[in-house]
Structures are given as C-alpha cells and as structure tokens.
Image (tube, coloured by chain):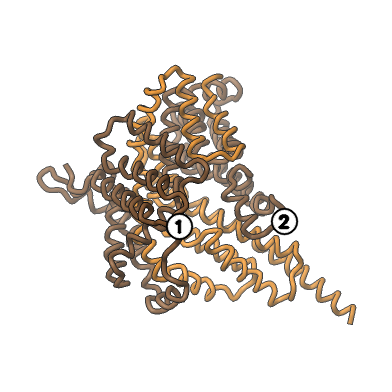
Chain colours: A brown, B orange
C-alpha cells in the first residue's frame, strides 16, 4: 500500500479536466462550446474513474474523442488573462523569483526519486515505488502551485482559469502520446513488429551488430519522414528492428537504444513536410515565401545530428 | 502484408492532413480488423492500453495550473528581459543563445517559448534588429534566412532538449512501450542518454549561426561598397 498512489493523482488530473469542461460550458461566447466541453468531460471521466470502468467502454469513449477532434471542433475559449502591461509590471516586481516555483518540479523529481523509496512505515510507503519519478513530478507540481500562490498572492480562481487556458491551448493533442502508445500496443498484438523483423532479416545482414544499429537509426529517420511523427515510427521500428536485433540478438542496452533512436527519429521530423506544425506553420507565421525555407535551414543540422546519433549508438549501445 | 495496413493508414492519413488523433485511432482499428479481432475486441484492447498509459498525460496536466499562474504574473516577460540582456551580439549569436535557453528550460520541464509566442514577436525582431543596426537595410533573401534559422532554433531546442526531462511525452512513451513488452528500463537512464545529443544539437546550431553571421557580414560589406561607389 502507498499513501500517494498514482491513482490519487489520476483523480486530481481528471478533476482539472472536468473543471476545464465546466469553464468551457460556462463560456457563452465559445464557438463550439458543447462539443469542446463534451471532449474534456469524456477525458476527465477516463482519468477519474478509469480504474473501475470496463475497457470496452473506454475504447468507445476514446473513439468518441477522436470524432469530436475532427474538423477542429475542439476550440479555445477567448483568452481572459492579464494584459501585457500588468504582466510586465509584475515581472518587474517579482523578478527571477518567478522561476522558483517552476524549478521546484525538476528538483522534486530528482530528490523524490532519491528519497521517497526510503520513506515507508509498517508496509505503507509514501509513494508507489513502481511510479516513483512520475509521482515525484506530480507532488512537485502541487508543491510548486502552493509556493507560486504564496509568491504571487493570486486569487484562488487564477490557477483554475489559467490552467484551463493552457489545457485548451493544447487541445486534443494532449492525448496523442497516449493514443500512439495504445496504437503501439495494438501493433504488437497484431504482430506488426515480427513481420517487419522478418522482412529486415531476409534483406539485411543483421548478424553484424553494427548493421542492426545502422538499420534501426536509419529506419527511425526514414520512417519518421514518411509518417511525419517520430512517436509513431518508434513503435514500429523498435518492435521490428531495435528489440529483436539490437537487444535480443546482440545484447544491446535498451535504454541507450531507445533514447538515441528516438533522437534519430527527430532528425527525420526536421526535414519532413509531413510534420506541418513544426516545419510549415512557422513559414506562414514568419511570412516566408519559400514553403520549404525552415526545412532547408534545418536540413544540414538534421543530417549532422543523424550521423552523430548513429555513431554514438554504434559506440555505446553494446558497451554500457 | 495485410498486417502492415495500419502503417499505410497513418501515411495516407497524415499525407491527406486528416486529424492526427483520428488517423491514429483508425490505424489501430484497421490493424485489429486485419489480424482478425472483432470491433468490440479492438475497442476493449484500445481502452485497456489507453487506461494503462494515462501516466503519459498526467504530469503535463498537473503542471499546467502553476505554469499558467506564473505566465499570468509575467514569466514570459521576465524571460524576455533576460534574453534581451544577454543579446548585445550578432543575429546568429542571438539565435544561438535562444537555442541554448530553450534547450535548458525544456530540459527542466519549463516550456518558455514557441513559434507564435516567442519566435515571431521577440526572437525575429531582435535578430533582424541587430543585423539592421550593423549593416542597414537587409535584403529580402537575408531576412528570410534569419527568420528560417530562428524557426529552426525553436524546433532544434525543443526536440533535443526535451528528452532530458523524465516527465515528458517521449520518455514516457518509450517507458510505456518497454512496459508492454516486459523489458525493464529506467526513465533516468533514457533521459541521461539524451544529453550527448543535446550538446551536439547546440554545436550544430553554433555552426549554422556562424554561417548566417558570415552571410550577413558579406552582404553588408558589399552593400557598403556599392554605396561608396555611387557617392
């Protein structure tokens, strides 16, 4: 048993989403008030009651959220925050103290991971040891909020309104990593990884450890260019090449492989027009004539970093 | 071959610029149907995995109220003051400083930046202003080069800084992936191995920033020479 289980924070996080749904529903000027409120209600419900709901119901709820997200139906409220003058004024007053609450979170993440495992009493631990780092971040965030409130002397509704503003700014993209992880699980279930592995095995001499590393890094790079998303490529490439060849066949370190492999994928994100929000949106925002201007600026760095990641993995993955 | 249908759905869906979330769900459904699962089985499996991976979204949500609160009281404005203070230098160096600030801040889990909120209103005017004050009016091509590199600074800083913070989507996604296939991996080890590339990314940006400064100087000197010839 643990005092702060992860489920405690799922309930807290779910309540933040439900409050956000309430904020949207109360906003009469909102363009698509009810669909947006419904989206956040569904998501909040998954967080608060997720542990006790039938999985098939959750599946249909996620499908519902996907349908609601189509056509940009999940919109932002009008922003109601402080004016620029007010912010400049309080930035002057608070100075670098403004960074202190924000820095509590990473400090707490490190300290919590070191200290919390030692805090237990008669079989009760303070936090769930399986989710140590995430629980530490959540505790840090709560602590940071308390310090921030004390520092700014803000009214209680300020974090509610501002949290809701940011949550709406992220919108449906908030659950994208979670949905992609679920997709990775379905791919594993359907044996996509084994299939990709069998193709790779018949076409490349994977008995050489360095070939496996090169295939994985370049695979992450090229697949990310095609799919426009390194997270989506990660499940396919790691299941199909990384785990069977680097980890199982040649005994490579999975942490090093995954961390560097993901970064090789990011090199692909830098050069693909498929990643529109990174590479095409700034073109419009900065009023550039050449649609590929940002990609062209990034391409030399992307290739240099791909080479760096490839060599780093070749050198380290079988040594540590 | 039919098993790869999910990948094709993703490629087609992204190419058609459909909503990413729906494309991902559709890809899952196609993959499940191709491997002989019933629709309800797919929904059940999707729901189970969605619930099991809730911890990926949780830290982001937990941090929003405090970050929003600090923004309300001028977090961005304060960061702007610090960047202005540090940047009495050339356009390339201003962009390089921003890359560094962005990498460090996001590695600590604080997102102060963004194409809309910082690059366009602060970084581009600062960088262009610096080049302008040295060499006078810039050609359209040079101005475009400055802007494109500023946008690149945002992307490079974010991508290669964020994997050092453990409570970020990518690290948690990797953790979740290894959990499903029962391989024990520590989030700290993955974050640690992101550090060398973070430095390399800064180095790569330093290289491009210097190239930009050289270009601006060359063009500035040429313009001065032309002006002298005329007079």
Q: Quadrant of the C terminus of chain B?
A: bottom right
Q: Answer whether residue B183 is visible to the viewer in this image.
A: no
Q: Is residue A302 left or right of residue B218?
A: left
Q: Residues within 10 Å of mark 1 (few under 14, many from 20)?
A: many
User: Image quadrant for the N terminus of chain B?
Assistant: top right
Disc 2 secondary structure class: loop
Please tell me if label 1 and label 2 are on a single chain: no
Residue A179 coordinates in the image, percent (x, y):
43, 37
Q: Secondary structure at mark 1?
A: helix
Chain containing the residue with disc 1: B
Name the one closer to the observer, B169 or B97.
B169
Residue lying farthest top? B36
The x, y position of residue A53, in whole percent, is: 27, 33
- Along the horizontal axis of the image, is B154 left or right of A253? right
Quarter of the figure with residue B209: bottom right
Q: Residue at x 39, y 30 (%)?
A: B46
Q: CA distance from mark 1 to mark 2?
A: 30 Å
Residue that badge 2 annotates: A289
Q: Is residue B226 above or below residue B186?
A: below
Q: Nearer the viewer, mark 1 or mark 2?
A: 2
Q: Nearer the viewer, residue B41 or A123?
A: B41
Residue at image mark 1: B106
Q: Chain of mark 2?
A: A
Up-down relation of residue A217 to residue A108 (above or below): above
Q: Residue furthest bottom?
A: B231
Q: Residue furthest right?
A: B230
Q: Where does residue A8 sit, x and y in percent of width and height?
A: 23, 47
């Amino acid at each position: 048993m643990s005092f702060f289980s992860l489920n405690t924070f799922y309930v807290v996080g779910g309540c933040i989403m439900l409050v956000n749904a309430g904020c949207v529903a109360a906003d009469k000027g909102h363009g698509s008030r009810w669909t947006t409120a419904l989206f956040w209600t569904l998501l909040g419900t998954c967080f608060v009651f997720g542990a006790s709901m039938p999985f098939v119901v959750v599946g249909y709820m996620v499908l519902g959220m996907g349908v609601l997200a189509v056509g940009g139906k999940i919109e932002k409220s009008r922003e109601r925050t402080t004016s620029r003058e007010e912010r400049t004024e309080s930035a002057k007053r608070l100075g670098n103290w403004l960074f202190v609450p924000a820095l509590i979170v990473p400090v707490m993440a490190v300290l919590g991971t070191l200290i919390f495992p030692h805090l237990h009493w008669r079989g009760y631990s303070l936090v769930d040891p399986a989710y140590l780092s995430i629980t530490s971040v959540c505790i840090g965030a709560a602590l940071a909020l308390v310090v921030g409130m004390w520092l700014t002397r803000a009214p209680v509704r300020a974090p509610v309104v501002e949290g809701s503003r940011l949550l709406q700014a992220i919108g449906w993209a908030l659950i994208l990593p979670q949905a992609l992880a679920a997709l990775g699980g379905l791919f594993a279930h359907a044996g996509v990884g084994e299939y990709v592995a069998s193709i790779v095995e018949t076409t490349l001499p994977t008995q050489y450890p360095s070939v496996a590393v090169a295939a994985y890094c370049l695979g992450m790079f090229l697949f990310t260019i095609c799919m426009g998303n390194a997270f989506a490529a990660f499940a396919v490439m790691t299941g199909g090449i990384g785990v069977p060849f680097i980890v199982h066949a040649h005994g490579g370190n999975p942490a090093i492989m995954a961390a560097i492999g993901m970064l090789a994928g990011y090199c692909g994100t830098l050069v693909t027009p498929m990643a529109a929000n990174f590479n095409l949106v700034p073109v419009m925002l900065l009023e550039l004539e050449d649609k590929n201007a940002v990609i062209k600026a990034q391409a030399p760095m992307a290739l240099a970093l791909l080479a760096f990641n490839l060599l780093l993995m070749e050198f380290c993955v079988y040594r540590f | 071959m039919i098993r790869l249908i999910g990948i094709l759905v993703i490629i087609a869906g992204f190419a058609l610029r459909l909503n990413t979330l729906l494309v991902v769900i559709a890809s899952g459904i196609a993959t499940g149907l191709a491997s002989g699962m019933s629709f309800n089985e797919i929904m059940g499996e999707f729901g189970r995995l969605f619930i099991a991976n809730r911890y990926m979204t949780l830290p982001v949500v937990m941090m929003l109220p405090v970050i929003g609160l600090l923004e309300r009281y001028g977090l961005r404005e304060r960061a702007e003051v610090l960047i202005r203070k540090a940047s009495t230098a050339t356009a390339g160096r201003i962009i390089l400083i921003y890359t560094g600030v962005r990498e460090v801040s996001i590695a600590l889990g604080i997102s102060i930046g963004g194409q809309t909120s910082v690059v366009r209103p602060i970084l581009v005017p600062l960088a262009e202003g610096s080049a302008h004050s040295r060499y006078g009016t810039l050609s359209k091509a040079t101005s475009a080069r400055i802007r494109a590199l500023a946008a690149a600074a945002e992307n490079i800083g974010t991508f290669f800084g964020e994997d050092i913070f453990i409570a970020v989507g990518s690290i948690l996604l990797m953790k979740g992936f290894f959990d499903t296939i029962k391989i024990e991996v520590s989030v700290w080890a993955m974050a640690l191995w992101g550090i060398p590339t973070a430095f390399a990314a800064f180095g790569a940006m330093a290289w491009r920033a210097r190239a930009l400064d050289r270009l601006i100087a060359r063009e500035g000197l040429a313009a001065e020479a032309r002006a002298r010839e005329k007079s």
